[in-house]
Image (spheres, helix red, strand yellow):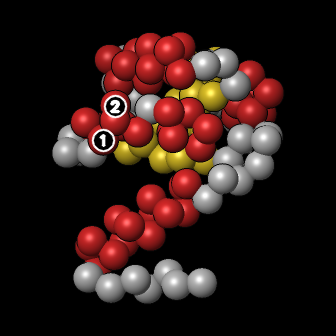
Amino acid sequence: MASIAVIGDGQSIQCFRSVGFATFAAPDGKTGAEQLRRAVREGYEIVFITETLSVVLKDIIQKYKSHPTPAIIPIPSVEGNLGYGMAAIKSNVEKAVGVDILKD
């Protein structure tokens, strides 16, 4: 099984701990950047990160896109869905397929 980490505010990530994922609390962008670098350094293959942090850390996340791991996947926080994660998925699918197959 792949090693999985979840980064975000404490309330959004606590449920992931109960299913065995490593969790890294990050109440702000500075801490989020540190936790993302830590997750990469520790070899996590999949990193879920709350959309709120994904927006703030988009430049750092972009640097890892050319690497096979980790897969960095934005997820909604308890504050709700910002649409950032779906927009990123749509963009990646369109690059891979050549057309937007996930139209609303």
Residue shown at 61% from the left, 19% from the top: 28
| Secondary structure at numbered mark 2 | helix
At which x and y percent is residue 104?
60, 84
Left of 41 or right of it: where is 8? Answer: right
Residue shown at 52% from the left, 84% from the top: 103
Q: Residues within 10 Å of mark 2 (few under 14, many from 20)?
A: few
Residue 95, picture quadrant: bottom left
Q: Disc 1 vs disc 2: Cβ atoms closer than 8 Å?
A: yes
> Could you tell me the amino acid type at mark 2?
Ile
| Secondary structure at numbered mark 1 | helix
Residue shown at 28% from the left, 80% from the top: 97
Q: What label sits on residue 62 in the rendered view? A: 1
Between the residue at mark 1 and the residue at mark 2, the CA separation in whole angstroms equals 5 Å
Look at the picture and state if 45 lies above or below 30: below
Residue 50 visible (yes or no): yes
Residue 41, picture quadrant: top left
> Could you tell me the amino acid type at mark 1?
Gln
Residue 15, picture quadrant: top right
Residue 18 visible (yes or no): no
Q: Residues within 10 Å of mark 1 (few under 14, many from 20)?
A: few
At which x and y percent is residue 67?
21, 41
Residue shown at 53% from the left, 14% from the top: 31
At which x and y percent is residue 101?
43, 85
Q: What label sits on residue 60 in the rendered view? A: 2
